[in-house]
Structure formats: structure tokens, C-alpha cells
């Protein structure tokens, strides 16, 4: 902490300790507390207090006052707890009566004060902050604080109740760890299972006994909210980083938990599931013979379908789960889809049903799917959990993918009326799902995640046709259509990337030769701009993906789509214009014959014309998005050296840099600098210059460097870079600085570039004056070398990478804000008569 901050603290402490003044913005206190928490990570609490004695003074003074602003009192409690994490300081405050005054019996604070939720929360968080040594546990027992914390679990303030629950869990875990260590040190009887220590209850502290008795009492309660509270507390304990707590508690609560599983699980099923999952993640399954897998299996069978889905999803994510439980969880996950398949077909074919006949349905599945809202919610939840499972990097069980694809296709067909159910239950489900956008989005996401698992040609054909039906359907929602296009892209890519691609490619060609392109053309001019935008993005992806497939290139070149994309450069919506630009940029990667377009006397496009269009957009479009897209395409082309000829580079790069560097949009300027960097990289590679170890003779190196610098000077790159170095938009200046540092290492060599510069740290104005007074010209190679040698670019970069918050959010700025707020508060309180 710097000395000028320390000088402000006594004045701030005086403001906080004066009940006649108030901090206008309570968030200032939160920020101040965050600052102290950050400082304690680097310095000990005692060292800070020795340097800033006013902090102790304000803690002592406020502990004697009872008319303070509640927010200020809450802040002081939390601050006291932060410094009382030092046992020595805690003992000092306790001996002086400060601890008992602030954290002893809450009634000593006054009934009116304690009624403020912010004070109760500050009391809890203060205890939480100091919970770093056993003296705190002894203090809590001495003043019966545990009973008060237990009561606060039912506080009307949700935040206070949640904080109390978390604090109880932390006290329990910390106390058991302390008792464990004490028992080990005193030769107590401690049972070791693997690497986990379990502690017998005879070694428990009074705090642990009190909290455990509370948990046991609430677990056996007839009041659902009490049981929920106990389970929530146990979940927090089991979720802690030290497993000894839940292991030690388990023998005391196991029978109560088993009794709960045998009773009505309404309202407590989800808390039980969370508890079991936390335990199974934190504790080895063989410790104390918890038989957690048996309990999870029983709970999975007992929950309703919606709750069971969430539990099954959690089980499938466990790394050490038993195989039988994994199979059971997968069965639960697939049951709703399996039921839908069964009731929508008279006699499902082999390979289309997810589960065998021995997998009995839950009694509530039929009931839930018979009601519209429940049917939609259950189907969406099933698909959502299924997607999570499919996206897991490793799985202990493989799903029946052929049947899975069939089931997802069936659901999606029901949503657009393309499936005709043959049972009354199926007809009912169809009525619920038809036109349902939520189910369509969830189903398309799953379908898009499984093309690589398609086992046969017919599955690919069915998926492609259904996705095209969705794109063709005029009633398809724009968000659904966007997902559909992305899923279609994955399936089309699968046809060329799969192991058996030789068998799939004919199906893809058949698909493309159908009405696919006519549907795309229609969607390019949809009345909804979102659909036009999504279609353009999809076509761009497709062109880049299949750029080496000659038949596709010819198909695109002869179908008229490039002409339509070119027309969309004039679309009234800027997002669509930007996407059209990006799509044209990707089309340019297709093999040369794509440009053979029909001449309709309205549009004729060749690669050179596209380049002209991009320059016109950069110069004339009034919206930022199209201009950004134009520069990004040009940068991409420049990085791919085949896309622009030497003549085009020489002619267009200076124009692009001039237009882009003067743009009002900072992102256009950054992309223009990226183009400058790409041009530098291209020029450097042509001259065989590398940034670091240049293994050339001095004369050869000097000749190549001069040639490089002359090329860059001719293009005007240095004028643009040095101008951007002090741009008002930080990302622009930072990018320019990084490019200049990179160039400096190239032209001077790594060793010389690292030498300390002359120390010139100018701003834009002084740099201009310096150039003028020195008669330096940024078009001259020798002058450019002199400037690069003189400028301290590394210092400039350090300043630029620092967030602007380092001033506005500094501790000094925060203290000044508090003082200013106090002064304004005094002014507003003046007599106006």
C-alpha cells in the first residue's frame, strides 16, 4: 500500500466513525473491503495494522457506538473479521472486549440495529472472515453464537439465510479438521481408509456437537422446510474441499437419510440428489462403506421423472460411478424419448427403439406427456441433458445411436406435423409438440451433435431431408432456422469427412442436386433479415468447407447464388450486408470455375470486381459492420497469399490502409492494422528475414532490412503505425505498438532491439514536434530506423496493456470518493431557509 493512500485513511476512518455522516454510495464500502482483502493476500494482517493504526482505532471506537449507519456497522464487522483472521490480533481484540461487543450476544447491538438485514449479514460474514484458527471456534461456543447462526437459517432475508447456512457448513468442516489434527497429535483413535481420515465423535468439539444435533433434529422433522434446510447444509459440507467432515458425520445421519428415502420425497428429492452427488464427487466410494451407489440407485427409482432426469444427468457425469448405476441413469435419460417412439408407431422396427421391453416406464411419464406444458418441459429437459451427455469428452457407456437418431428425428417431425401418430397417446403428444419452438431448438441441437455417430446411409439421408424440410417450411422460426442450418452444415461435412465417405458422397450429391439450392435462394431474400443473415453465414461456411470439391464449386458457380449474394451487398440491414461481404470472401476460395456466372446484363462479377466492391464498401458504407467485414475479408485474403496478386497488393494495400486508419469505427482501424501486419509478414517472408536469430552476414542483413523498410515506407505503413500509436481507442494503440515492437526486433535484431532506447516517451503532439524539429521523414528508411531506435516502445506497451481501471478503481480514487461523498452530504444538510 502506497504512502499517499495511507495518508487518506485516517480521514476516511473519521468519516466512517462519525454517526452524523453517511457514505452516499454503499458500494464504496464493498469496494473498500475488496481492496483490504486483496492487500491481505500480499501482507500479513498484523503488518497492515502496524502501518495503519487508525484501522484498529475505528474498530475499537465503533464497537462502543450504537447509533451508526447499518451499512457502516456491517462493513466494520466484516473488516474486523478480516483482520481477526490473525490469531494474535483476535486475542488482543477479545481481551479488550471488542470481539464480545461486536460478535458476542447480538442483543448487545440493540434490537433496532439487529433488525437490519445488512447488520445480520455483516455479523455472519465477519465470523466467516475470521474463521482461520481454533480461537474463533472457542469464542463461538463461549457466547452461544452457534444457536443464533442456526436461527438465522430461517431469516426472512434470503441472503442472510443463505450466508448462515454456508457459515454453519464452514464452521462444521473447519472444526472437524481442527479436531482431526488435534486427535492425530494426541494419539487419539483415528480410523484411516486409504488417504482419508475419519474422526470418531468422542473427539468432536462442542460446536460440532451442536450443529450435528441440529441436523439430526431437522432430518427427523415432519416439516418439509426443516428437512430441506438440513439437506442443504449437508450438501454444503459435502461440497467442501476436505472430505473428513461428511465422512465423520455419515454414521450419525445415515439411518435418517435411509428413512427419508423410504418416505414421501415431495420437496426433498432434489436436495437429496444434490447431497448424494456431492458426496460421490468428494468421497471415495469405499470409505466407511457409504454404499452411496445403492442409495443413488434407490433415489433414482423413487423420484418423479423430471427430478430423476436431473439426477441421471449428474450420475452420468461422475468419473468413478459403478457401471450398473451408469446404465440405470442412461435408461432414465432415454425413457421419455423411448415412450414417444413407442406411442407414435404401430409396431416400431428393430433398431429404432431406444430401450428393450424390460425397461419399465415410470408411472408418471404417460401422465406428464399427456399435459401440454409438462410434455414440452419434459421433452426439452430430456433433450438438454442428452446434449450435455453427448458433448462430454469421455463416456463410460455408449448409447444406441441408430435408435437415438431415429427418436430425435421423430420428435422433430412431430413438431412440424411431418409424423403421423397411430395411437391416441401419440396423437395427443403430437398436438402438444406441433409448432413448439422450444422443443425444435433443443431437438435440432441434439441432431447437430450426432452426425459423426450415424451408422448408415439411410440415417444420413433422413437427417438431411428433415433439416431441409425445416429450412423449406415458411413457418420455421428464425432462431430455429439458424440452428437448423448449423446442424445441416455438420451433417453435410460428415458426408465428406466420415471413414466411409465414399459411400456417403453420392447421397450428398443427390441432396445437392435436389431442390436444396432453390430453397437457399428463396431464403436469401426472406422478409426476415435474421433469416437472410443466417443463410448467408451458412453458405459462406459451406463454400469454405467444400472449396476443394470440384463438383460443388461448379454447382455454386452455375446456380446463380453468387449474383444473389452480390445483390445483398445493398441490403437495407447492415448485418446482412456484412454477412454478404464475408460470404463473397469465402466464395473466392472456391476453385476458379465458380465465377462462370450467367450474364443477365444486371450483374457480372469476377474476382477483381469483388475487390472493387470491398473498397467501395470500406469507403462509402455508413454502417460499421459492413466496413469491418470488408477489411476482415481483405486481411484474410492477404494472409492467404494465393488470393491477391502482387499487382493487386501494390495497388490496394495503400488504399485500404489509408481508408481503414481514418475510419471512425475503432474495430475497422484494428482490422486495418491487422492487414498492415499481414503485409509486413508477407514482405518479411519474401526477404527471408526472421525476427530473432538472423543467420546472415551483416551486409546481406542490412540490404534485406533496407529493402523491407523501403517497401513498407512506399506503402505508408510507418505513417499509419505511428499515428495509431496514440489513438484515442486503446485497442488501436495497443495493436500498433505490438506491430512496431515486432518490426523493431526484425530490423534491429533481438539483441539490439532489447537495448535500452534513448528514453523518448512522447505523446502525439510532442512526437509530431520532435519529428519536425529533427527534420525526420517517415518515408525515409534511415529516419524510420532512428525513430524506432529512439522510441521506448516497450514502456508504451506496458502503459497500454494496463486497464484504465487502474486509475478509476484504485484504492486512492476510492478513498477520495468516500471523502467527497461525505463532504457533499454535509453540504446537502445545510439549512436552506
Image (tube, rainbow, N blue to C red):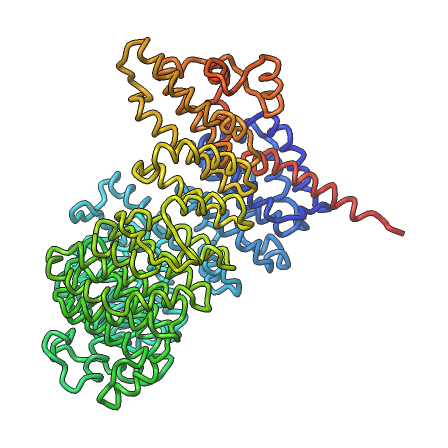
* Extreme residue toward the right, this view: 833
Q: Position of residue 87 (x, y in %)?
A: 44, 36
Q: Residue at x 38, y 67 (%)?
A: 523
Query: Residue 299 versus residue 734: which sits nearer the camera?
Result: 734
Which quadrant of the structure image shows residue 492? Answer: bottom left
Q: Do we see residue 684 in this rendering? A: yes
Relative vertical location of residue 125 with respect to residue 262 in this rendering, above or below = above
Q: Do we see residue 91 in this rendering? A: no
Q: Residue at x 39, y 13 (%)?
A: 752
Q: Position of residue 337 (x, y in %)?
A: 23, 75
Q: Is residue 152 left or right of residue 763?
A: left
Query: Residue 645 versus residue 154: which sits nearer the camera?
Result: 645
Total numbered labels placed on residues in the image: 0
Please identify the quadrant where the N terminus is shown: top right
Q: Position of residue 155 (x, y in %)?
A: 51, 63
Q: Is residue 709 left or right of residue 512?
A: right
Q: Residue at x 18, y 56 (%)?
A: 496
Query: Residue 285 versus residue 752: which sits nearer the camera?
Result: 752
Relative vertical location of residue 408 with respect to residue 450 in this rendering, above or below = below
Relative vertical location of residue 437 with respect to residue 620 in this rendering, above or below = below
Q: Residue at x 16, y 71 (%)?
A: 403
Q: Position of residue 246 (x, y in %)?
A: 28, 55
Amino acid at each position: 500500500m502506497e504512502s499517499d493512500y495511507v495518508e487518506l485513511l485516517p480521514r476516511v476512518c473519521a468519516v466512517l466513525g462519525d454517526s452524523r455522516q453517511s457514505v452516499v454510495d454503499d458500494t464504496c464500502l464493498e469496494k473498500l473491503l475488496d481492496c483490504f482483502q486483496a492487500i491481505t493476500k500480499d501482507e500479513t494482517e498484523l503488518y497492515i495494522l502496524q502501518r495503519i493504526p487508525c484501522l484498529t482505532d475505528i474498530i475499537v471506537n465503533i464497537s462502543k457506538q450504537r447509533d451508526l449507519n447499518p451499512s457502516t456497522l456491517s462493513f466494520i464487522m466484516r473488516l474486523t473479521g478480516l483482520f481477526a483472521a490473525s490469531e494474535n490480533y483476535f486475542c488482543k481484540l477479545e481481551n479488550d472486549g471488542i470481539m464480545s461487543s461486536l460478535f458476542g450476544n447480538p442483543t448487545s447491538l440493540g434490537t433496532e440495529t439487529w433488525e437490519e438485514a445488512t447488520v445480520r449479514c455483516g455479523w455472519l460474514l465477519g465470523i466467516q472472515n475470521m474463521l482461520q484458527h481454533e480461537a474463533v471456534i472457542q469464542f463461538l461456543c463461549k457466547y452461544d453464537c452457534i444457536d443464533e447462526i442456526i436461527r438465522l437459517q430461517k431469516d426472512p432475508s434470503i441472503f442472510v439465510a443463505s450466508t448462515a447456512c454456508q457459515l454453519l457448513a464452514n464452521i462444521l468442516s473447519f472444526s472437524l479438521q481442527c479436531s482431526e489434527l488435534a486427535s492425530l497429535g494426541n494419539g487419539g483413535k483415528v480410523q484411516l481408509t486409504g488417504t482419508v481420515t475419519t474422526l470418531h465423535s468422542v473427539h468432536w468439539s462442542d460446536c460440532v456437537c451442536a450443529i450435528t444435533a441440529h441436523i439430526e433434529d431437522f432430518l427427523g422433522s415432519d416439516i418439509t422446510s426443516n428437512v430441506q434446510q438440513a439437506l442443504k447444509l449437508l450438501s454444503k459440507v459435502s461440497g467442501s474441499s476436505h472430505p473428513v467432515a461428511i465422512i465423520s458425520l455419515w454414521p450419525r445421519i445415515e439411518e435418517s437419510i435411509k428413512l427419508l428415502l423410504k418416505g414421501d420425497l415431495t420437496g426433498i428429492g432434489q436436495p437429496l440428489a444434490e447431497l448424494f452427488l456431492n458426496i460421490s464427487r468428494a468421497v471415495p466410494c469405499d470409505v466407511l462403506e457409504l454404499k452411496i451407489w445403492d442409495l443413488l440407485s434407490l433415489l433414482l427409482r423413487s423420484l418423479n421423472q423430471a427430478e430423476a432426469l436431473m439426477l441421471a444427468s449428474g450420475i452420468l457425469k461422475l468419473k468413478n460411478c459403478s457401471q450398473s448405476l451408469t446404465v440405470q441413469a442412461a435408461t432414465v435419460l432415454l425413457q421419455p424419448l423411448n415412450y414417444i417412439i413407442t406411442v407414435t408407431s404401430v409396431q416400431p422396427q428393430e433398431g429404432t427403439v431406444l430401450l428393450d421391453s424390460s425397461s419399465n416406464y415410470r408411472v408418471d411419464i404417460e401422465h406428464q406427456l399427456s399435459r401440454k406444458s409438462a410434455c414440452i418441459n419434459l421433452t426439452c429437459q430430456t433433450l438438454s441433458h442428452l446434449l450435455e451427455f453427448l458433448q462430454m469428452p469421455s463416456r463410460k457407456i455408449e448409447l444406441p445411436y441408430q435408435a437415438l437418431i431415429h427418436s430425435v428425428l421423430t420428435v422433430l417431425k412431430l413438431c412440424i406435423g411431418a409424423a403421423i401418430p397411430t395411437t391416441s397417446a401419440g396423437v395427443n403428444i403430437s398436438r402438444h409438440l406441433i409448432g413448439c419452438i422450444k422443443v425444435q431448438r433443443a431437438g435440432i441441437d441434439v441432431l447437430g451433435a450426432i452426425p459423426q455417430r450415424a451408422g448408415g446411409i439411410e440415417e444420413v439421408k433422413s437427417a438431411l431431408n428433415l433439416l431441409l424440410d425445416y429450412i423449406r417450411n415458411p413457418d420455421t422460426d428464425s432462431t430455429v432456422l439458424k440452428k437448423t442450418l448449423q446442424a445441416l452444415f455438420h451433417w453435410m461435412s460428415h458426408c465428406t469427412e466420415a471413414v466411409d465417405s465414399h459411400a456417403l458422397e453420392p447421397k450428398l450429391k443427390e441432396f445437392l442436386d435436389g431442390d436444396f439450392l432453390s430453397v437457399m435462394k428463396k431464403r436469401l431474400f426472406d422478409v426476415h433479415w435474421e433469416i437472410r443473415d443466417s443463410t448467408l453465414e451458412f453458405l459462406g461456411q459451406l463454400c469454405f468447407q467444400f472449396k476443394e470439391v470440384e463438383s460443388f464449386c461448379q454447382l455454386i458457380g452455375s446456380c446463380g447464388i453468387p449474383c444473389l449474394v452480390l445483390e445483398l451487398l445493398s441490403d437495407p440491414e447492415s448485418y446482412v450486408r456484412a454477412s454478404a461481404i464475408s460470404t463473397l470472401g469465402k466464395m473466392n476460395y472456391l476453385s476458379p470455375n465458380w465465377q462462370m456466372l450467367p450474364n443477365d446484363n444486371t450483374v457480372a462479377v469476377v474476382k477483381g470486381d469483388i475487390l472493387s466492391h470491398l473498397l467501395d464498401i470500406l469507403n462509402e458504407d455508413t454502417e460499421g459492420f459492413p466496413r469491418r467485414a470488408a477489411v476482415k475479408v481483405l486481411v484474410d485474403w492477404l494472409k492467404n497469399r494465393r488470393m491477391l496478386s502482387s499487382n493487386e497488393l501494390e495497388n490496394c494495400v495503400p488504399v485500404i490502409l489509408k481508408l481503414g486508419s481514418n475510419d471512425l469505427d475503432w474495430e475497422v482501424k484494428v482490422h486495418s492494422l491487422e492487414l498492415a501486419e499481414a503485409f509486413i509478414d508477407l514482405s518479411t517472408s519474401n526477404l527471408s528475414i526472421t525476427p530473432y536469430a538472423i543467420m546472415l552476414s551483416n551486409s546481406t542483413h542490412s540490404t534485406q532490412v533496407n529493402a523491407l523498410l523501403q517497401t513498407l515506407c512506399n506503402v505508408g505503413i510507418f505513417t499509419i503505425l505511428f499515428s495509431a500509436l496514440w489513438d484515442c481507442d486503446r485497442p488501436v494503440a495497443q495493436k500498433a505498438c505490438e506491430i512496431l515492437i515486432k518490426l523493431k526486433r526484425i530490423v534491429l535484431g533481438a539483441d539490439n532491439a532489447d537495448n535500452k532506447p534513448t528514453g523518448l516517451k512522447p505523446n502525439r503532439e510532442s512526437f509530431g514536434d520532435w519529428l519536425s524539429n529533427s527534420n525526420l521523414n517517415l518515408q525515409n528508411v534511415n529516419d524510420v530506423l532512428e525513430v524506432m531506435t529512439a522510441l521506448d516502445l516497450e514502456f508504451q506497451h506496458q502503459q497500454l496493456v494496463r486497464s484504465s481501471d487502474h486509475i478509476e478503481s484504485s484504492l486512492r480514487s476510492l478513498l477520495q470518493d468516500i471523502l467527497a461523498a461525505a463532504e457533499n452530504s454535509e453540504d446537502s444538510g445545510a439549512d436552506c431557509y
